[in-house]
Image: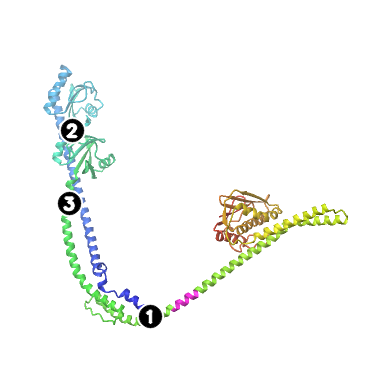
Amino acid sequence: MNTSIKESSGMKENRIPFYRKIIFKVFFLIFFVLVFVLGFNLILTNNMMNERIQQRLNDDFQSAFYMTENFINLVSQTSQMWAKEIVANHFSFQVIKQHQPEEISSLLGIEKNKMSADSIILLDEQGRILAQSGSDFKIGDSLSYQDIVKQTFKSRTSLTKILRERESFIVYSSAIIQQDNKIKGMLLVGYFINDSFVENIKKNTSLEIAFIGNSAVMSSSQWGTSNNLDILPISYLDYQNLLYSPQLIKEIIYKDKVYIVNARKLHNMESLTTGSILFAYPYDKIKQQKSDLLHKKLDILYLSLLIALLIIYIVVRKYLVAISKLTQAMHGVSDNKVYEKINIDSQDEIELLATSFNQMGTELNTLHTNLESEIERKTQELKELNDNLHSLVVSEIEKNRQKEQQLVQQSRLAQMGEMISMIAHQWRQPLAAISSTSMAIHLKAQLNKLDNDTAIELSDKISDYSQHLSTTIDDFREFFKPNKEKQETNYTELVDGVLKIIKVSINNKDIEIITHLNCHKTLYSYPNEIKQVILNLLKNAEDALLEKQPDNPVITIATQDGILTVSDNAGGISEEYIDKIFAPYFSTKTKKDGTGLGLYMSKTIIEEHCGGRLSVSNDKEGAVFMVVL
């Protein structure tokens, strides 16, 4: 006992690994706390920095959108001004009537070049094209379906709208041609929002820009490459989310380059949505800004951490020295050395701990003196208790074994009583035949009619009947002979062996036995014990049928796939009793005494001796006992 105490508590300080020393644990704990706090602060700071950057991005996107709209509005106003001026100066109704369409188209081309427009179209009062320059439409085409044409004719005022032409957006302005307050036609002046137009906007915003119609790219700037966008660089669903949430931004990758994108709806001059604009901010610029800010913050945090750790180490070391003294004193007590008083004058909790330890050391010395004798006494008591417990366990096991033997004996005696009744049934007919033959011999002898042939014939009959009785005795004796070793057998042999003994007795009680023996699988078990189980199940079915008295009582024995079932048509077992049916001394027999041991011993034989399973259930006719081996 003393040796184990020395080994567990007498460890010298210089044997303790560094990572297990208090100074390391305290230092590590404080370091972890500081790192956690500072890291949490860093995360918060980083989140704030991300929020500021996101706010700045939203501001930049909003500013770029306003600038783009203003640029488009400026183009719209310019085109409307030119349209009105051309109509006022050159295209009165008389001028149109005096010239051929080709001549008017040439005049339109001159005016288009003069104002740097992309398209000029002259329409009649029905909206059909009389002449055009720069447009994909042909002379004679009708544009009456266009909103700008319908609304201009209806309102009799000049309008500006953003339309789609040549897979791009175009800003069209209208001007009415009229005579005597009657509309005679209309002039449309248009400017395309093409890639060159977008590049001019990009120079003023430093953002990549793309004009989108539905999900198609109408025009765009050169996104970090020498080529313009061909397809939308973001999924349609994500793009729709951006359109309906103007403050939302999303990170995308386009041609191995990361962008932060935002989208806004594009409106025409009457604030009707006609398309959308996609803005993109190169992530490299944001990443560089974040990296610079983060490095500065990390430098400050690392310096603060080192200063904090230095201060903590100086403060903690003072207390660790006192704790080290307490540790050495504790080692002395565990090594059975004379306890020496610890003197610590720190005027704090450590001093209180040292005082308490001094008192504890004195008490430990006293307790240690009596500890070994107390342990020895308790050990002896425990040994005696274990010995008594072992004796009790052995005694109870022996009692249980004897009870089980008694149950087996009672079951065998009950079966033997039933066997005597079966022997009586088996012998009744042969004995009656022997008696009748003997009387015949006696009568013929009295009448002097007994010749040698008749005597021999009658004596042979008596011999056959006697041999049948002897065979019956051998069957019953073999039935109760216990198997000491497992033998090969099968369900068919087992059932036939039992039916030789009990079938006559059951048939005499007007009970039919039906067999369906379809399993001839070889079993390696104890045949006579299994026969006793089958006999018990048949007797149990017989008793149930005699008690319930059903019409046409039947017992069915069936084998299939390694399973043997014994069933009857007596109506089944009550749900109240079915869970107790295999309990010892439990019986439901009412018309004659039952020991309550037959089914209990049958389950014991099948499950404990033969390693199988015996169970019971009800079907629509009656009870079904199932043996699985």
Q: Earlier in the sequence, mark 3 or mark 1?
A: 3
Q: Distance between the residues labelled 2 and 3?
A: 37 Å
Residue 365 vertical position relative to residue 474 in the rendered view, above or below: below
SS category of the residue bearing label 3: helix
Q: Mark 2 points at which residue?
A: 194
Q: Please give left or right for residue 325 compared with residue 460 in the image.
A: left
Q: Along the line of sight, which residue is nearer the eye, 460 or 304?
A: 460
Residue at the far front in the pictured view = 452
Amino acid type, residue under disc 1 in the picture: Glu
Instruction: Give residue 146's position: percent from left, percent from top.
Output: 24, 28
Residue 526 vertical position relative to residue 253 in the rendered view, above or below: below
Magenta segment, principal secondary structure? helix
Residue at the spot x=35%, y=82% of the render? Answer: 369
Quadrant containing the N terminus is bottom left
- Residue range in magenta is 380-389
Q: Name the residue under label 3.
A: 291
Q: Along the line of sight, which residue is nearer the eye, 153 or 434?
A: 434
Q: Nearer the viewer, mark 2 or mark 1?
A: 1
Q: Name the residue under label 1.
A: 372
Amino acid type, residue under disc 2 in the picture: Asn
Q: Is residue 572 visible?
A: yes
Mark 3–mark 1 CB contact (< 8 Å)? no
